[in-house]
Amino acid sequence: MYFKKQKNSFYRFLLFPLTLTLILFLSSLTAYGASSETDIPVRVGVLAKRGTDFCRSKWNPTIDYLSEHIEGYSFSLLPLTFKQIESAVDKQEIDFLLTNPGYYVAMEVRKHVERIATLINKGPDGRPIIMFGGVVVSLTTRNDINEFKDLVGKRFVGRSRYRDRQKPVSYW
């Protein structure tokens, strides 16, 4: 039952705002001279952290829906790995990007991307999850690190569990 609620929450809190935002944005382009006789390609890059096939099975219905319901535009899906996202942004190979919050922050800082819609996940109790957590581990011999404020001026690294990242997402 929890997974069914989560799926409905996903569609309600991400797909609806994303679809509405895309419709409004693209409708405004049509009003400023875009021709409805030829379809304008819109490339949507999606983080494929579970593989290309899973990404396509998850997002192709949305891409097809947008292509069918927004006249004058043809949407295409580009499943991307972590390594491919930055290159796709640099080369302007995508018009929209769907990624996780951590990587979005990295893209916002490095590439100045801007968000137009965000996903609000719900926890098992139905309340929105608005924060992510992490753990800092130190050696037992490091008596100088007991609280977060003890990290000021010290170096530490965050490690990713994903194999295709070349370097950690967060490090200081």
Image (cartoon, rainbow, N blue to C red):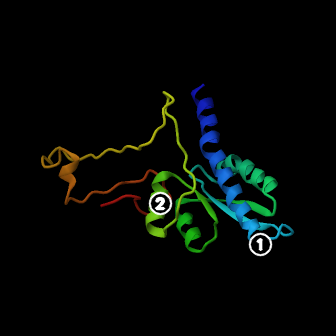
Q: Outermost residue toward the bottom?
A: 91
Q: Is residue 102 above or below residue 147?
A: below
Mark 1: few, some, or many residues within 10 Å (few <14, many ≥20)? few
> What residue is pinned by disc 2?
165
For residue 158, what is the image quadrant? bottom left
Kind of residue at disc 1: Gly
Quarter of the picture containing the N terminus is top right
Mark 2: few, some, or many residues within 10 Å (few <14, many ≥20)? some
Nearest-to-viewer mark from 2 and 1:
1
Residue under the point 60% across and 30% down: 5
Q: Outermost residue toward the left?
A: 143
Q: Which badge, 2 or 1, comes first in the chain's sequence? A: 1
For residue 66, what is the image quadrant? bottom right
Give coordinates of residue 64: x percent, y percent: 77, 52
Give coordinates of residue 6: x percent, y percent: 58, 34
Give coordinates of residue 2: x percent, y percent: 57, 28
Q: Outermost residue toward the front?
A: 31
Q: Which numbered dot is residue 50? A: none
- Determine whether the residue tagged by mark 1 lies in a helix, strand or loop: loop
Kind of residue at disc 2: Arg
> What residue is pinned by disc 1?
33
